Amino acid sequence: MDSQLSVGILGEATLTVDESNTAIAHGSGTVSVLATPALIALMEKAAQNSVAPFLVTGSTTVGTMVNIKHLAATPIGLNVAAASRLTEVDGRRLVFEVEVKDDVEIVATGVHERFIIKVDSFMKRAANKSKS
């Protein structure tokens, strides 16, 4: 891990709501609005984007916890932007405040946790599970 990884790092990710990221498409609901799973993925992407430049080669982060409030529906055609702020660095554990806004209002807020991992050893462990 690079020593420049510190509290306050900001990240962002955006998307436009379309049929592929609705609750219907994700199987999480029966309406054509941004799905909560797609919202969470966008929050995770913002957090990942924020710290990726600070990680050593061969490392990445994986999401381990999400605690959000999905406050408002976003219909097809609107843009959504997720913002993350690194609030805690505890060894390999990273904690982020996350917020998503659409073209009209705040859509979601919450906390997201990620862990720094070494890709090779992580994937070896995952592959060994399939051999069990």
Image (tube, grey):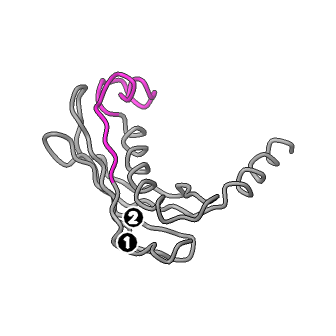
Residue linked to disc 1: 87
Specify whether 1 is left or right of 27: right
Left or right? Give the position of 93 relative to 19: right
Quarter where residue 16 is shown: top left
For numbered disc 2, what is the local secondary structure? strand
Quarter of the picture holding the N terminus: bottom right
Label ID, residue 101: none
- Residue 21 or residue 71, whichever sits in front: 21
Residue 42's place in the image compared with 32, above or below, is: below
Q: How many marks?
A: 2
Specify the farthest residue to the right: 132
Which residue occupies 72% across, 54% down?
120
Residue type at mark 2?
Phe
Residue 68 higher or lower than 90, as above or below? above
Indicate whether residue 56 is drawn in magenta. no
Which percent across, then down, holds residue 122?
70, 55
Q: Are marks 1 and 2 in contact (CB under 8 Å)?
A: yes
Please provide percent x and percent y for residue 131: 86, 42
Q: Residues within 10 Å of mark 1 (few under 14, many from 20)?
A: some
The residue depicted at 30 percent of the width and 46 percent of the height is: 70
Task: Pick the quarter of the image with the C terminus.
Answer: top right
Magenta-highlighted residues: 12-34
Q: Is residue 63 left or right of residue 40?
A: right
For marks 1 and 2, the one nearer the N-term is: 1
- Please state if 79 lies on the left or on the right of 123 as rendered: left
Is 33 in the magenta? yes
- Above or below residue 7? Residue 16 is above
SS label for mark 1? strand
In the rendering, which numbered label is found on residue 96?
A: 2
